[in-house]
Amino acid sequence: MIEICNVSHEIQGAKILSGIDLRLPKGGITALIGPNGAGKSTLLSLIARLEKLQGGTIRVDGADVSQTATAELARKLSILRQDTQVAARLTVADLVGFGRYPHHKGRPGPEDHAQVEQALATMALTGLRDRFLDALSGGQRQRAFVAMVLAQDTDYVLLDEPLNNLDMKHAREMMQQLRRAAHELGKSFVVVIHDINFAAAYADHIVALKDGAVQAQGRPDEIVTRASLREIFDLDIEVETVAGHPFALHQITPSSHR
Amino acid sequence: MPSETSLSSPLPRLRLSGESRTLLILAALALLAILLFLTLGVPRGAWEFALSFRAGKLAGLILVAFAIACATQLFHVATRNRILTPAIMGFDALYLMIQTSLVYVLGAMATLDLDPMVKYGVEVIVMMGFSTGLFLWLFAAKARDLHLLVLVGIIFGTLFRSLSGFISRMIDPNDFVVVQGAMFARFNAVEIDLLTVAAGLTALTLPLLWHMRHQFDVLALGRDVAIGLGLRYRPVMFVTFAMIGLLVSVSTALVGPVTFFGLLVTHLAYHLLPGARFAPTLAAGTLIAIVTLVGGQAIYEHVLGLQGTLSVIIDTLGGITFLYLLLKGARR
């Protein structure tokens, strides 16, 4: 379980998060939703000790992230930030191989190679393994970074908008792979998702942030409703039920019905 | 993944990868350059004198080759940018300023009389202080902006250069000769007593570099990814910048400032070994630097009979490389 106690954060005097108290369950997919600037990415960075905690505590399976050795945390928890860029010239297989660094510290063994192959296969990158990153499209590169994080093989995986740049096919496949890893291997994913319908269809738990505070949390059918979406996004959104999932028609205003 | 040799498996894979083939060829070229440098144009009967004289110089050139290649590559890893060098950031301008201030404060005679160990020790400490200070200020703070870094570097470089220009105007013209000696790269007059100290200091970095080689690979992925993979980012950056300061002072002390040389050799290494790890790239960069410096000096001194202008040619070539990289838009 990830326990977030009374976490506040400000950047250059601007309040980003105020008094967040949250328990993210172990196992399954937790979707973080909310409007731009709600503090979703900051919260992920704080959980993954990329930013220093200014107030409050965060514990991952009981380990305080500001006290635990960073190398030890890297075997418990992995993160992929939004718009990650790598300056070095690397092949896809090399990049994914770096995901194993926390386990082998530079001397990969057979187990590491196997994990890399598996991560490449999961993200449908086996055919692109020897391509250099700068010769990939945005979506392919995104999949390569997700594969690196999967190769890290941690119990907790934090992903900031992993569906960025992905086409429909790969977006759906990625969410299906995450769900498989969550339910078959017991992994926990915390995923920032902008497309509310992906959250509704694949997440086990949704947390909605707004103005640096938790606005709502619960099962998808509790959060993806017309009333609660209006609270979260200040937007009137029609919600239908399609194939057992709530489905938000956020592209159109409800009055423009046929 | 490149094959790893560990203590438990003393034999590397016998198959020669493209990487090791390139490194072997470069090593052969470097050896050839060294042989040429030692043997070209030695007059009959003067072998003993020539060899002992040239061996000292050779050691200096090899030391400089390594120091420059290593400092530049470390700088590229730490800043995640392949177009900057410590020299462009004003590191060797600082070294010159230390020289000028020393002569100004102590006078030329006293400066020349200083124990080279003490003098050099002080210089290295100031250089390391500057580079780690720069790191603390620029990287530990929120600003991890590349443009800010470049700007600060250019301003520092200009500041140091102007200050040494200003101080040298106030120096006795006779004393200025001493400063002038330090202001231009001089590959043909490596000082032997300095060489021992510099070699000792450089030797200190070797075990550390070897120990940290995998960490540099992770560091090159950028701060967020590196921390995510469990790298202790701040200590690693701190040590990296301290080593850059040390290596720059080693090379500047031995031969004076060479602005573009590091850029030239590291980019040749990146080009020859695309996508390679830190350690093989450093080996390639050092070998290329040895070929260029030792080979170039051999041809210059012993074939063409010229003195001390090799740095001009190297900087010209390096400058052209720099322009080419800028035009190509290679911000990496």
Image (spheres, grey):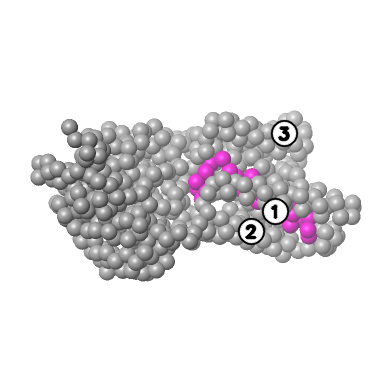
Using the image, name the chain to which the residue with label 1 belongs. Answer: B
Q: Position of residue A233 (x, y in %)?
A: 29, 50
* Amino acid at dot 1: Leu
* Amino acid at dot 2: Phe
**Relative to residue A106, is residue B63 drawn left or right?**
right
**Relative to residue B69, is residue A47 drawn left or right?**
left
Residue at 49% in and 59% down: A12
Label 1, label 3: how far apart the Cα atoms are: 29 Å
Residue at 48% in and 61% down: A13
Q: Quadrant of the N terminus of chain B?
A: top left
**Relative to residue A214, is residue B274 drawn left or right?**
right
Between residue A237 and residue B110, name the one nearer to us. A237
* Secondary element at tag 2: helix
Badge 2 vs badge 1, beta-carbon distance below 8 Å: yes
Residue on which disc 1 sits? B94
First of labels 2, 1 by sequence position:
1
- Between circles 2 and 3, the one closer to the viewer is 2
Residue at 18% in and 50% down: A225
Q: Position of residue A186 (x, y in %)?
A: 17, 56
**Relative to residue B249, is residue B305 drawn left or right?**
right
Using the image, name the chain to which the residue with label 2 belongs. Answer: B
* Secondary element at tag 1: helix
* Amino acid at dot 3: Tyr
Do the residues marked 2 and 3 share a common chain? Answer: yes
Q: Is residue B85 magenta?
A: yes
Using the image, name the chain to which the residue with label 3 belongs. Answer: B
Write down the quadrant of residue B320 in the picture.
top right
Q: Taking the image as drawn, is residue B101 in sight?
A: yes
Q: The magenta stretch spans which residues?
A: B77-102
Residue on which disc 3 sits? B300
